[in-house]
Structures are given as structure tokens and as C-alpha cells.
Image (cartoon, rainbow, N blue to C red):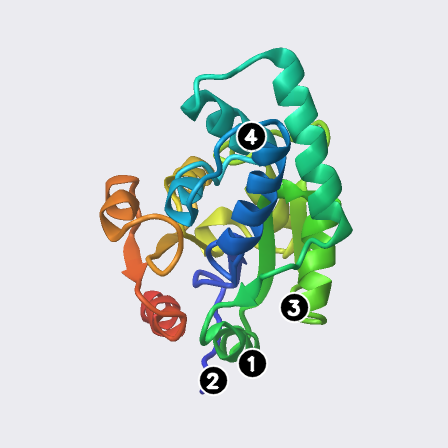
Amino acid sequence: MSTKICKNEIKCAVFDLDGTLLNTIKTITHYLNFALQKSGLSPVSEQECSGFVGDGVRMLILRAIEARGEYTDSLFARMLEDYNTAYDAEPHHLTEVYEGVGEMLRTLAESGVRLAVLSNKPHFATCATIERFFPDTFDVVLGGREGVPLKPNPTALIDAIASLGASPAQCAYIGDSDVDMLTARNAGVALSVGASWGYRSREVLIESGADCIADTASDLPRLIFTKNT
């Protein structure tokens, strides 16, 4: 399939990473439980952990500790260090690409849509993960960087869009969380797509302002190309 991308149409698609392109909840849960249990705290389920993600690792750790009513500054610092050390040693443990994502990305790229990733995961880890699972696929890859506020602040998304040679009015943003939908709205993108296969429900995505919902990765090209007609 091929479609001509015109000046006032969708020229680029920016994707969240965890819960959108990759199923990392088993990975995150595994390392969070390592840090919790090392500090003598009870483990989390994948379902509970999915409610903690989306705002970066510091908020992940904070939410897990607060859910157990055990917060102290020293506990937070120790768990953050334990989590990061274990995660960085084997960051792709248990991680899987969601079904249909590879084909969907190829369809978009072959149709002239430029591709980017924007994650609240640290920048070096985001780049390493994309290189591992999607080499030579994305034009721009951005993670959390020092001095740049995390999503839902729109700064990083606007940076990514500019690096793709486009404007927000020519961009689709795809993510699986309320944070992602707020980011898209704050940046003023043309199309915000909620990925319902990720870590939040359709209801949460709709309530957070998603323009439309993709239930599978294969739905995305149709949604973007429909916007271009």
C-alpha cells in the first residue's frame, strides 16, 4: 500500500515505547519485585505494576513504596539504585514486541510517514532498546534527558516532531496511557491514537482525550491514512 503524503497531511508518527511498541510489563515487574523484596517489601502483580508505569522510573518506585505505606527517603534511594542496577544489567529480559507492530511500522514507512519514538524511559536505555528490537526503523529516538521535562510536558514531543521536519499539525502521536494522550493534547498534534493493547483501558484513553482507539497494531495505518483523506 502506498499513499502520497501532502503538506497538510500526516507526515510523521511518534510512538510511545513501553506498552505501545513493546510489552515490557513482565520486565518492569520482575525488576521492581527484585528491588521490593531486597528491601523486605511484598512483591507486586503485573496488574498492579501496570498502574504504576508511565511517568518514569522514579515515579514507578515511589508509587510502589507508597502503596505499601513504607516511604522513607533512604528506602526510595536504595530501591531506585537496586532497580536501576538490575535493570541496566539485562534490560530486555522478558520483553516482547507486540503482535503486528513490525509490519505496521513497515507499512507506515513505505507510505512516506517518518517515524519517531518518545519515551519517559532514560534516553540511553530507550536508544539501546530500539537498537535491539527495531534497528534502522526510526528516524528519531528520544528518551528521558536531563534538563528536559518528561511527558505529559510537550517539550520533548515538539522536539521530536521538529527533528522529523514536521509541525504538530502534521503529526500523529500513538501511546497506551493517559500520560500519552495528555502529551499529544499539550503538543497540539493532529491525531492522538490510543493503543488499547497496552497498559490502560479503552475507557481511560478515551477519557484522556484520544481522538481514536487502535485495538491492534494493524489498525494504525488505516487510522492515519483516513486522516490523510
Of the numbered discs 3 and 4, the one sitting upstream in the chain is 4
Residue in the image at 58% along x and 12% along y:
72
* Amino acid bearing label 1: Glu
Asked if 39 appears above or below 87 in the picture, the reply is above
Viewer-side label of 1, 4: 4
Q: Crowding at label 2, few (<14), some or many (≥20) Cα neighbours within 10 Å? A: few
Viewer-side label of 1, 3: 3
Residue 38 percent coordinates (x, y): 64, 33
What residue would you read off at disc 1?
A: 110
Residue 187 percent coordinates (x, y): 47, 39
Viewer-side label of 4, 2: 4
What residue would you read off at disc 3?
A: 133
Disc 1 and disc 4: Cα gap in Å? Answer: 40 Å
Of the numbered discs 1 and 2, the one sitting upstream in the chain is 2
Residue in the image at 69% along x and 46% along y:
87
What residue would you read off at disc 4?
A: 61
**Cβ atoms under marks 1 and 3 closer than 8 Å:** no
Disc 4 and disc 2: Cα gap in Å? Answer: 44 Å
